[in-house]
C-alpha cells in the first residue's frame, strides 16, 4: 500500500512537470548510476559522511529506481523479495554467516 501511494505521488510529480517524455528506461538507468556516484562521492575522502547529504543522495537513487520500476511495469517490493529469495539460496546462513566471499567460494 505504501509503495502504491509513493508510486502515485511520483507519477503526479512527473506529470505536473511533463517529464515523462524524458524518462525512457535508458535515461532512468543512467540517472540511477549518476545519483549512485553522487552518493559514493559523500564517502570519497572519509567514511564519516554528512548524514543529511547521504540522505538526499540516497533519496535521489531510490526515486529513480522507483521511476524505472514503474516505467517497466515492475513492483519494487516484489522484485526485491524475488531477488532476496534467489540470494538466500546462493548464500545459505550455514555457510555465509560472517563471510564476505562470493557464493561460488563458500
Image (cartoon, rainbow, N blue to C red):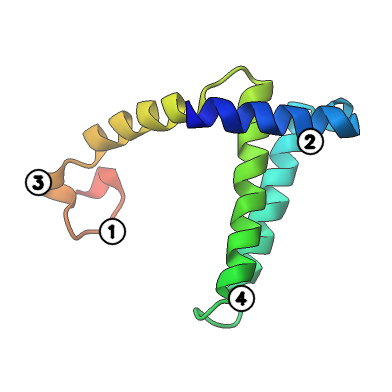
Q: Which residue is drawn at 78% across and 34% down?
A: 13
Q: Mark 1 points at which residue?
A: 100
Label 2's element? helix
Q: In this view, does 86 lie above or below 48?
A: above
Counting from the top left corner in percent of width and height, residue 57 is at 65, 59
**Disc 1 to disc 2, C-alpha distance:** 33 Å
Q: Which of 60 and 15 is in front in this view?
A: 15
Q: Mark 4 points at which residue?
A: 44
**Disc 3 to disc 1, C-alpha distance:** 13 Å
Counting from the top left corner in percent of width and height, residue 42 is at 62, 71
Counting from the top left corner in percent of width and height, residue 80 is at 42, 32
Of labels 4 and 3, earlier in sequence is 4
Of labels 1 and 4, earlier in sequence is 4
Q: Mark 2 points at which residue?
A: 27
Q: Mark 3 points at which residue?
A: 94
Q: Which of 16 and 34 is in front in this view?
A: 16
Q: In this view, does 38 lie above or below 20?
A: below
Q: Which of marks 1 and 2 is in front?
A: 2
Label 1 environment density (alpha carbons within 10 Å; few <14, some 14–19, many ≥20): few
Counting from the top left corner in percent of width and height, residue 18 is at 90, 29
Contact between labelled residues 1 and 3, with CB atoms less than 8 Å apart? no
Q: Residue at x 31, y 30 (%)?
A: 86
Label 3 environment density (alpha carbons within 10 Å; few <14, some 14–19, many ≥20): few
Checking the image for residue 49, the label placed there is none
**Disc 4 to disc 2, C-alpha distance:** 25 Å
Amino acid at each position: 500500500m505504501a509503495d502504491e501511494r509513493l508510486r502515485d505521488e511520483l507519477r503526479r510529480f512527473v506529470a505536473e512537470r511533463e517529464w515523462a517524455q524524458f524518462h525512457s528506461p535508458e535515461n532512468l538507468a543512467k540517472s540511477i548510476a549518476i545519483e549512485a556516484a553522487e552518493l559514493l562521492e559523500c564517502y570519497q575522502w572519509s567514511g564519516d559522511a554528512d548524514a543529511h547529504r547521504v540522505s538526499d543522495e540516497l533519496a535521489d537513487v531510490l526515486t529513480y529506481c522507483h521511476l524505472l520500476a514503474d516505467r517497466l511495469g515492475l513492483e519494487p517490493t516484489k522484485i526485491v523479495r524475488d531477488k532476496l529469495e534467489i540470494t538466500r539460496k546462493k548464500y545459505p546462513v550455514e555457510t555465509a554467516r560472517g563471510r564476505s566471499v562470493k557464493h561460488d567460494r563458500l
